[in-house]
Amino acid sequence: MVLTFAQFRKSKNAINAVFAILSAIGFASSMGACFFLNKQTTLQNDLWRWSCGNHKKGIVSEVLDFGLVCHVVSYGWKFGLVQASLELLTFIISIVAFVILKYAYFARYGSFGKIF
């Protein structure tokens, strides 16, 4: 029974490690794509500047409502900031919980034990 729990813990740690590696690869490739596409863009014009600029200038289109696009992009930006802030907060809480757990383990047993 103890052997089964040890095997399960090892497989769970391996799955977590694979997930972390895949997440890092995905993040790095998406950032690389963003930097590459930003370098390739000659106009340096984005959707927010285009829609909100046309909305402020009073340009009217029969196909597209620039005001609506401007509001949607602005709210998307705000929600993105909230999401990034929550992810940063989650990361900080995870680090603090890890340190507290290791400190409690050290106080109880006199050593830090395994890192992961």
Image (spheres, grey):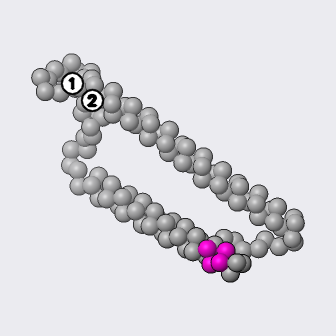
Is 48 in the magenta?
no
In front here: 57 or 112?
A: 112
Amino acid type indicated by mark 1: Asp
Q: Quadrant of residue 64?
A: top left
- Residue 85 visible from this viewpoint: yes
Tag 1 and tag 2, C-beta contact below 8 Å: yes
Quick check: 93 above or below 24? above
| Residue that extends furthest to the left in the rendered view of this protein | 62
Query: What residue range appears in magenta?
Result: 4-8
Badge 2 is on which residue? 69
In front here: 45 or 64?
A: 64
Is 7 in the magenta?
yes
Residue 46 is left or right of residue 2, and the answer is left
Q: Quadrant of residue 14?
A: bottom right
Badge 1 is on which residue? 65
Per the image, label 2 sits on a secondary structure element best described as helix
Amino acid type indicated by mark 2: Val
Measured as percent of width and height from the top left, residue 38 is found at 29, 52
Distance from the alpha carbon under mark 1 to that under mark 2: 6 Å
What residue lies at 87% left-to-right and 64% top-to-bottom?
A: 107
| Residue that extends furthest to the bottom in the rendered view of this protein | 3
